[in-house]
Image (spheres, rainbow, N blue to C red):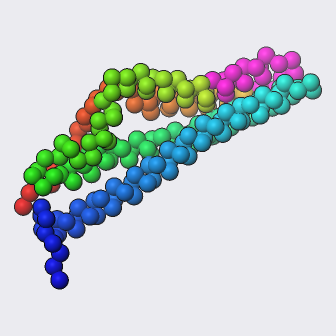
């Protein structure tokens, strides 16, 4: 029994079905990563509040401030890794999958257009700078601030001072990575793979 052929051969339709299944799987992964990434922001905020609550107690323990850089960098790194995977999926959809799903007449302009169109907004660059500022405020600033507050405390121990210096350096390296990973481009279209040759 042969399949109905609309706009291509059975083999072309099978390839298109595989590509569409790949699209569905990638979008599902992207969505789950977005949910996780957003929850990491809440976790970082909760860690910040919990640490501050412990430190401002009457019998304050300033050495607990040194927990915050560890928590911020670990959560921040997980956030960054998820954000990069989300962006990588979007790039793959724009550069490779969309051209492979060219319309039967050979035009690829309308296929998966949202993957590129939403990047063309007039406020995109401002939004990306704002997101970078939020990322730094959530994961880097509290870490560096808590380290500085520990250094200003009265009972700084030599071993914890060494730990705090290492934490500050690790935080600065992480901050550099966050800034480097920020997509501050204003490109609407990216270089796409050429569409497959028509038989």
| Magenta stretch secondary structure, dominant | helix
Seen from the viewer's position, the closer of residues 193 and 69 is 193
Work out which residue is located at the far left of the displayed protein and give it.
199
Query: Which corner quadrant of the image does residue 141 belong to?
Result: top right
Q: Residue at x 67, y 27 (%)?
A: 143
Q: State the extent of the magenta-drawn residues as a range.
A: 141-163
Q: Residue at x 72, y 19 (%)?
A: 148
Seen from the viewer's position, the closer of residues 108 and 87 is 108
Q: Residue at x 72, y 24 (%)?
A: 146
- Give yes or no for residue 161 being in the magenta stretch: yes
Across and down, in percent, residue 196 comes to 15, 54
**Is 91 displayed left or right of 5 in the figure?**
right
Across and down, in percent, residue 29 comes to 45, 53
How many labels sit on residues?
0
State whether residue 17 is above or below residue 71: below
- Give yes or no for residue 158 being in the magenta stretch: yes
**Is 183 displayed left or right of 116 in the figure?**
right
Seen from the viewer's position, the closer of residues 194 and 17 is 17
Which quadrant is home to the C terminus? bottom left
Which quadrant is home to the N terminus? bottom left
């Amino acid at each position: 029994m042969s399949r109905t052929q609309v706009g291509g051969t059975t083999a072309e339709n099978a390839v298109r079905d595989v590509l569409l299944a790949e699209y569905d799987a990638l979008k599902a992964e992207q969505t789950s990563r977005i949910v996780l990434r957003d929850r990491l922001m809440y976790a970082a905020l909760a860690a910040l509040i919990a640490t501050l609550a412990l430190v401002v107690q009457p019998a304050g323990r300033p050495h607990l401030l040194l927990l915050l850089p560890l928590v911020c960098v670990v959560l921040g790194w997980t956030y960054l890794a998820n954000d990069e995977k989300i962006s990588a999926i979007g790039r793959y959809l724009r550069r490779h999958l969309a051209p492979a799903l060219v319309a039967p007449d050979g035009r690829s302009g309308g296929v998966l257009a949202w993957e590129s169109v939403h990047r063309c907004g007039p406020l995109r660059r401002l939004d990306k700078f704002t997101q970078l500022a939020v990322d730094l405020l959530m994961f880097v600033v509290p870490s560096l601030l808590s380290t500085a507050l520990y250094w200003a405390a009265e009972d700084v121990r030599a071993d914890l001072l060494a730990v705090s210096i290492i934490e500050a350096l690790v935080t600065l390296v992480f901050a550099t990575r966050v800034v480097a990973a920020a997509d501050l481009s204003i490109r609407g279209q990216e270089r796409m793979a050429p569409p497959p040759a028509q038989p």
